[in-house]
Image (tube, rainbow, N blue to C red):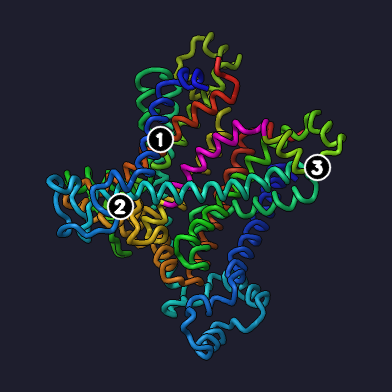
Amino acid sequence: MLRTLRKAPLSAKIGMIVIACYVLIAVFAGVIAPFGETEVVAYEFEPWGGDYLLGTDNLGRDTFSRLIYAARNTLGIAALATLLAFCVGGTLGLIAATIGGWTDQLLSRLVDVLMAIPALIFALLLLTILGPNLVNMIIVIALIDSTRVFRLTRAVAMNVVVMDFVEAAQVRGEGLGWIIRREILPNITAPLVAELGLRFCFVFLTISALSFLGLGIQPPAADWGSMVRESASLITFGDITPLLPAAAIGILTVSINMVVDWMLHMSSGLQD
Amino acid sequence: MHPLVKMIGQRLGLGLLTLLLISLIIFFAVELLPGDIAQAILGQAATPETVAAWRADLGLDRPATVRYVEWLGNAVRGDFGTSLANGLVISDLIGERLKNTLFLASYAAAIAVPLAVILGLLAALFRNTIFDRTVNIATLSSISFPEFFVAYILILFLSVKTGLFPSISNIRPDMSLSELLYRTALPALTLTLVVTAHMMRMTRAAIINLLASPYIEMARLKGMSPMRVIVLHALPNALAPIINVIALNLAYLITGVVLIEVVFIYPGLGQLMVDSVAKRDVTVVQACCLIFAAFYIVINLLADVLSIASNPRLLHPK
């Protein structure tokens, strides 16, 4: 494990270090941040420097502290939605691939139709119907992304299902759960882990986009998307504060992509 | 029958079927609510009489299947009913905005597609040089950042610092074309940056894939210049994947346009949709969703047909 890590290319190492920093900041947000998440500490739009490292926002809250708390909120919610998408999409994909026949046809065609609606547009429709709030957003994003996870899981599991050792297990009389967990899953972990990274990026960007539109994480909770929205007017005065949360989003997606690139390279058997 | 006509017919049928299924989802997603939309929007505090009156007003007391057929029949003729929030006729709300959105998307596409293909060709021609790497890094970073980040960077540098373009794209129908192009330059440029990267990388990859083929080597041995080899010999065979990725990105433009319209306060369909989501104006959102989905399907359909038509091998499957 350590040896593979050491052999990783520079870009993947940088990516992993950045991701680790993000996770640390998210976990220890309460310790690192000088002020509270929703604490009003000064007048609105204080300039950078002094007591307030990055100034204050439209309500007089410390921007630096909110940036740190936003790491926790945004990353936590994105992780939750991604896991949910994987549980639903992954399980159904594995079942469809293993059972085949009508179950597979039914699920696959359903997913085809759901995927024919652009993701963001579909998310907006479902949020209108359910009402835009945090819980609904997580459910909606998990549902939409689970269709993509289903596609991939089913496709990679299909390649394993036709193998002799799976047939041997079936002949031996093993149940569906056993075959999926012990025969198929260990053979498709590499592409699934890479997909997990990519899916997290997409979910993370969707959440940021929805929050930016005012339909995702609701105030007063800090989150990068809505922070851009709240401070957007500053940009017309040449103040780059709105770019900070946006950059925080971008740097994380780039880092994850760099690590995923390396993992895909490894799992494709090209490591030598 | 000519195989091309048959193929187009098949794809068209499939596209229509998909659109029908999507309209079913869009309509019946509302029915999944516990209670109904009247109860959900008016909230718990509403008296039963208010809810009942609203329900009767919207015709919700009739069976869903009847309302669906009616809704779809009217939608096909361009009548989407009235808005729940303000009672305005939806087709009036949408008409001008749809035109604006299409204008912005085609403006961006008109810049992005030629730019991406030319950059891709050049990157394939000068592969593994400084030029190739620079283009690669620049395009990669532009896809990894959220659309609004790209938009604000452009506003900062092209509007606030230098004053080249307006940061808000308020347009009116009576403006001249050059005025329109000037005012929507920043949103179009943002969209261009967002979609060019993927198209350019795929163009480069599709062409480089072919460069090891014997016929390319033959052309090279004949003494053709590298540019001619790529443009005349490699490009025609790489068309199918390139067309596909262009279509994919044009389809992506449709969703990207939503965020960009909000950033630049551009009076388009995406902005209307976002505003309506916050107001839970279901009928307007349904209409926008159906229109966006229809464009999405048409673009994918076009890509399918063009990429098969550009490849004789796909045209005559064994």
Amino acid type indicated by mark 1:
Ile
Pointer 2 indicates a residue of which chain? A
Q: Position of residue B104 (x, y in %)?
A: 38, 53
Q: Residue furthest left?
A: A50
Pointer 3 indicates a residue of which chain? A
**In the figure, residue B227 lies in which quadrant?**
top left
Does the segment drawn in magenta span residue B198?
no
Quadrant in which the C terminus of chain A appears: top right
> Could you tell which of marks 1 and 3 lies nearer the N-terminus?
1
Q: Secondary structure at mark 2?
A: helix
Amino acid type indicated by mark 3:
Gly
Q: Is residue A137 above or below residue A201?
A: below
In the rendered image, is residue B184 in sight? yes
Q: Position of residue B28 (x, y in %)?
A: 62, 68
Q: Residue at x 60, y 68 (%)?
A: B27
In front here: A82 or B230? A82
**Residue B205 appears left or right of A110:** left
Amino acid type indicated by mark 2:
Val
Q: Secondary structure at mark 3?
A: loop
Residue A175 is tagged as: 3
Are the residues at dot 2 and dot 3 in contact (C-beta closer than 8 Å)? Answer: no
Task: State which region is magenta.
Answer: A186-207
Q: Position of residue B179 (x, y in %)?
A: 26, 55
Circle 1 is placed at which residue position?
A19
**Marks 1/3 same chain:** yes
CA separation in Å, label 1 and label 2: 21 Å
> Could you tell which of marks 2 and 3 lies nearer the N-terminus?
3
**Marks 1/2 same chain:** yes
Q: Residue at x 78, y 29 (%)?
A: A163
Residue A228 is tagged as: 2
Q: Main secondary structure of the magenta part?
A: helix
Q: How many marks?
A: 3
